[in-house]
Image (spheres, helix red, strand yellow):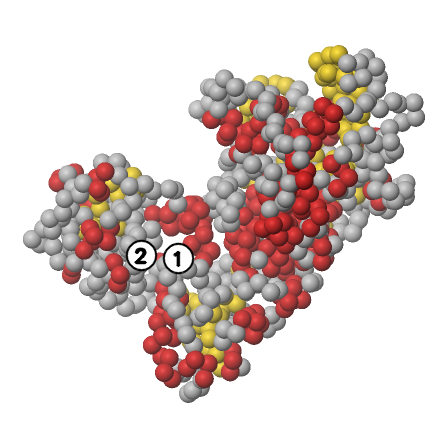
Amino acid sequence: MSFCEHALAARLTPPSSSTLVYKEECTQCFDNYDMPEGIDVCLSCFNGACPAAPNNHAHQHAMKSGHHLTLNIRRVPKPTDDELPRPAKLTKLEIKEDDSSSKYEFKTFVRCWGCSGAKLDTYAGAAEAIATAATAVIHAVEATKRSEIKAWTEEVAPCEHFEALAQQPADSFSLDNLHQCSTCDKRDNLWLCLACGHVGCGRRQYDGSGGNNHAIDHFEQTGHKVSVKLGTITPEGTADAYCYVCDDNKLDPKLAEHLKAFGINVLVQQKTEKSVAELQLEQNLRFDFSMTTLDGTQLQPVAGPGLTGLKNLGNSCYMASVLQCVFGIDRFRDRYFPTAPDHFATCTKMDPAKCVLCQLHKMANGLWSGRYAELQKSTDGQLGHQAGIPPAHFKDAIAGDHYEFSTMRQQDAFEFLQHLSKQIDIAERSVEGGSLNPTSVFDFKVEERLQCLECKRVRYQVQKSSSISIPVIKRPLEEQEPSSGDSQKQLKFAPVSIGECMDLMFGEEELEGYSCPSCKKPTSAVKSMRFATFPKVLAVQVRRFELVNWVPEKLDVPVQVPLEGITLGAYHGQGLQPGEEPLPETEEIKNSNKEVQEQLVDEEVVAQLESMGFPRVRCVKAIKKTGNNGAEAAMGWIFEHMDDPAVDDPEEPQQQSASASGNTADSEAVEQLMAMGFPQERAEKALKASGNDASRALDRLLNMADDDADDSNNVAAPATSGKGDESDETRSNYELTGFVLHKGTSVHCGHYIASIRHGLTAADSRWFMFNDSKVAEQAEPQPEQAYVYFFTRNDRAS
């Protein structure tokens, strides 16, 4: 096409080093630049979209945004050739191909969707602007890679050796010598001494890669303390800098000034090599796990709709295992899979990569369409495991701002399940009042009963919950000889049934020193818990970790769980019974209850910390201090304040005036909560009760069953949904449909895998193991060591 009015009218700004450029994969499906049609990158906002059927998200994006010009990028394998030409000699810092350049080449062209997707041969008067933007896109770091690098990168601080740097370029220094080590023929991983301009190669790695140690040799010979890695310099004045005295990566606040002493202008530099963070990420992603059963039996790979694997992004197995179990639930599949095209067509958000609902639909389509589930062929024609789909966009959208899940460290799968449910709940409340919210399958009500042993009066409370956490019973069986390097013998435990664990959880607990409002004196009381209603899907965490010498260790207690399921009828609460007399409600108790509700804490996290030996008051305080961000955050606070003499002192309740209920809720916070789907009246009420703290108000809204829960403590009838005994919520027969298993000795390391049952009934279903991208049929699932179970209510049974 020789002329395009849209190209002439385009006002394009090239992406900077901090701009997110989605150039490897469509943000709305898992089509990528390895496919025949490649990926179209918007030259205005740098969204990546597929340009071909069946989705053609590139055309859809152009029509919604008015951004007509895109750069099509397609990666194609290079033909094998033993006589590949030698790369041209580098005489200055410039863009050069990455490590995959010997295997792939990139085909690019500009197209205009305002002209029906026509390829542009010339750009009229906009040639320079379009060419500049396209070149910047080609050399930009892929957005997901940038997020991964950011997650891996540790905080780097400056040091005094950069501040006190004395520079004197050597007589032999020349810009023409920056392309090669001054001692050997190495042309990559080069470090520039900021004192004299010497260029030396990096350290030699254990596997023979890297450099020949000539940069550090220069430091040892001259005492020149600091250097910068050539090829990592950006126009923004950042680069990998290193101090040999501190023996660590450091920040050079005056990098541009220091490089200017050698005639290097950072404004014209482009990043050409992988940074230290990128290399660390690459190393981590090389880790692989064999697809075996617990006894080491190799499983045969499978693929298809619902049997699509997820690539490991680097310690992301906790997320992959939970996602497979969650999207294996029919309510999640039906909510996001068939409705994906409709959502993408109507979503008003211009950045699909940041839209939680877009990424939920994308994930469901990726897992259930079967388009991306294809077994790989080896060179000998044998079928191997599938490549899997990368959940990078999903992770950024669902956890990009979370202080733990946004990192590349191993996390707790159960805590991620709770975080995922909360984020979906928030996102769905903005859609038709949240009536389609699939997380409702986890919701149920818990009835808590307290009885004074002196006067026999009782109090019932009903709270909303979405999972339970059960303890395990430790019955040491025998001692096992220590493995090599261990000084202590390891205990083996006898198997316990899940019924025994349930009995322990739902059993009565005696409370000493209870201040009875009826007896008006300290007495003893017993408390217990029951199901007020039953959920469609019951998520059960097994408390497999306890503190041993202040280090969390895993309890390998086999928990026997029948594959055909369990019955929970024995744990169904009945509310206030005939002949039972409720405890009186004093003003002090009412105020105490209100204070507890105003500072809600996750009781499952409390139970998890208590199981490690911490007192309850310390657990509650830690959870509040860390903003209800999970067990790991609370545990970190506990360790930091272990020597605090007041660590176990209860917090003083926040004082509020008598007219607190009449305070005006912050209008901006009200609008923020209303945008999440909460009615204005409830949002204002929650903000007033939370001192206009939007975060606490949100937790209150999500955890309170309804508005009446603020003031209702005594329950005079069985706490069901009001639908009668035939209600689904009164049925208590459950089938095991999935579980997450943790391999390893600590929550901070090891590996998570998932086992999921596919089929309408237990009789015609089959079990499959999901190990990141690898999926295989599992003839004999082994749930004994599982960490999280998913039980689905059998509504066919009564």
Marks 2 & 1, CB-CB < 8 Å contact: yes
CA distance for labels 2 and 1: 9 Å
On the rendered structure, is 405 left or right of 135?
right
Circle 1 residues within 10 Å: few <14, some 14–19, many ≥20: few
Residue positioned most to the front: 659
- Disc 1 is placed on an element classified as loop
**Above or below: residue 434 compared with residue 37:** above
Q: Position of residue 463 (x, y in %)?
A: 74, 35
| Residue located at (72% from left, 55% from top) | 433
State whether residue 615 appears in this view. yes
Instruction: Pinpoint residue 299: horizontal percent, then vertical percent.
Output: 61, 47
Residue 342 versus residue 447 in the image, above or below: below
Q: Residue at x 22, y 59 (%)?
A: 265
- Would you identify the image quadrant in which residue 737 lies? top right
**What amino acid is found at the position of numbered circle 1 in the picture?**
Ser
Residue 25 left/right relative to 600: left
Q: Position of residue 526 (x, y in %)?
A: 77, 19
Q: Would residue 328 be visible to someone looking at this image? A: no
As drawn, the label of residue 236 is 2
Task: Find disc 1 in the rendering and name its residue.
Answer: 18
Q: Secondary structure at mark 2?
A: loop
Compared across the picture, whether 640 is left or right of 516 comes to left
Near mark 2 (Cα within 10 A), the count class, few <14, some 14-19 or many ≥20, is some
Disc 2 or 1, which lies upstream in sequence?
Answer: 1
Q: Amino acid at mark 2?
A: Glu
In front: 275, or 85?
Answer: 275
Q: Residue at x 63, y 31 (%)?
A: 656
